[in-house]
Image (spheres, grey):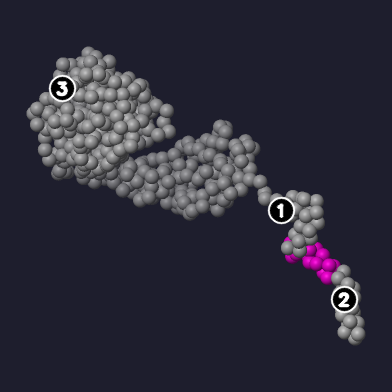
Amino acid sequence: MGKRRRVAERRSAARKTRPAVIGGMIAVVVGGAGFGVYALFGGGAAAEDGSATAATAPKKPSVPTGPVPAAQVKAIATQFLTSWQTGKIAQAVAATNDTTTAATSLLTGYTKDAHITGVTITPGPATGAKVPFTVKGTVTYGGTSKPLTYQSALTVVRRTSDGKPLVDWHASVVHPDLADGDKLLTGEAGTPPIKAVDRDGGELTLTKYPSLGTILDSLREKYGKKAGGKAGIELRVVRGKESKAAKSADKTLLELSKGTPGTVKTTLSPTLQAAAEAQVAKKAKSSVVLMRPSTGEILAVANQSHGFNTAFQGSLAPGSTMKVVTSSLLIEKKLASADKPHPCPKFSTYGGWKFQNDDKFEIKGGTFKASFARSCNTAFISQAPKLDNDSLTKQAQQVFGLGMDNWAIGVSTFDGSVPVQSQAQMAASLIGQGGVRMNPLNMASVAATVESGVFRQPYLVSPDLDGRTLAKATRTMSAATLSQLRELLQYTAAYGTAAEAMAGLGPDYGAKTGSAEVDGQKQPNGWFTAYHGDLAGAGVVIAGGHGGSTAGPIVAALLKAGS
């Protein structure tokens, strides 16, 4: 009986103390440390009416998306530009989306290394999220000062994590000639200036030839000291090891005191260089090279876009112009002959890929010459099973001097690439796709090799100046192969896809057109390579369309100008 009474007493006590426990729980919530308790009670109450999720789930802040409003673009641009102008580097960096030390380093170096002071920055009207601005300042070094003025621009974007508007950081914001990883530096120039001259002794200037900027910079970097000049004081862009423009030469932005230039003679023809400049100016994203097959001298080089030397350093699929090299291979291996029948079906499959011709055309009962002249893809793809994976690579290297990375023309170049591939990629390389990469210099050299019968490495500066060793091919085509290859190119220039562009030239001529498909690009890159007499040239128009109507007229015009 006593035990029963004690149990009852304990139960009664529990009932009496429950409000105190609940009150303690409420007190915890009010105290701000009881989220778990609040959730527990909320969950219990909400469970009855089915609204547990709505009542208990914490609301996740929404991240703003879409275009940044004009007022916010103006505000963040003003914050960045004002902080930069007043030397408040931390505040300027805070207005950008840079998560490294790049912005801090470059903005600090703007004064410390570049010695630019008295900066005023004037923003212009924004176009969407892009804000142009003008920078004015003074560069002072060694007791000499010069004013500096230039235009740049910034773009305001949203930070991914929270949608906050910030300046999209790139080195080009500070100066448009900077690539990420570069820096600005004022001091004695790393190399003395040069006076580059053409083959007749006339000075090569940007005023006369606007597209030679990158080449003149490269010539100075390579020959400034060798040419006997004396360095001056300059503000310049210094390329970083990890820079996206690491292969480009440093760039002079402002001369505080002139050095004494040394003279560097090039092989450029003033007449043909002027003609090349005029031709590329007519066509966006175009580049061209003209050379002399008998010597390898480069007579003209021009790029419509002046910031990168696509003509010498581009790395692009050459499309059907590569069929010149492939044809030499097929003829040597007796897999094709100019006047013998050769298949050109609508489709050809190899390595699991189905290849087709432009507009799915076919040539019934045609010769290899007819297939070449009309640029029949399947005529080449059909021969892939009879070739080794490295057949085209060896042909390009051993006969045409391509892909060896050993050209020494006087400035930096990309010497072409024809990697060993297998299956479908090997087949694609036969028509200038897959992993094959070229530029107008490479393809002008291909045409020159056909015209002269031997590979002579192109050059812009005579090797006599610095004792360079020019690259050589390890073998030449047989007389029979060369004769047939010339027949193919001549027929294409007279009656094939190159006929319209080459009209008015001949009979000692040859040409090949090309179109290279590029992922994400609506129009293919248009290519053209040709020779006439002792001249050979090649050009490309990026996203231009078929080579016969885009790059063709540019190359043909230079061949005519040099005739």
Secondary element at tag 3: loop
Discs 1/3, front? 3
Q: Residue at x 86, y 71 (%)?
A: 18
Question: Where is residue 107 drawn, in percent x and y?
Answer: 48, 49
Side of 356 where 99 appears, left or right: right
Asked if labels 3 and 2 touch by Cβ distance under 8 angstroms, the answer is: no
Q: Nearer the viewer, residue 125 or 483?
A: 483
Q: Residues within 10 Å of mark 2 (few under 14, many from 20)?
A: few
Residue 528's image quarter?
Answer: top left
Asked if labels 1 and 2 touch by Cβ distance under 8 angstroms, the answer is: no
Residues in magenta? 21-35
Which three-letter amino acid code belongs to the residue tagged 1?
Ala
Q: Nearer the viewer, residue 488 or 547?
A: 488
Q: Residue at x 48, y 36 (%)?
A: 151
Please give the residue where the numbered disc 1 appears in the rendered image.
57
Q: Residue at x 31, y 48 (%)?
A: 190
Quadrant showing the N terminus: bottom right
Please give the residue where the numbered disc 3 appears in the rendered image.
340
Which mark, by number, is residue 11? 2
Query: Does residue 31 belong to the magenta stretch?
Result: yes
Q: Is residue 236 above or below residue 27?
A: above
Pick whichever of labels 1 and 3 is earlier in the sequence.
Answer: 1
Report whether residue 22 is seen.
Answer: yes
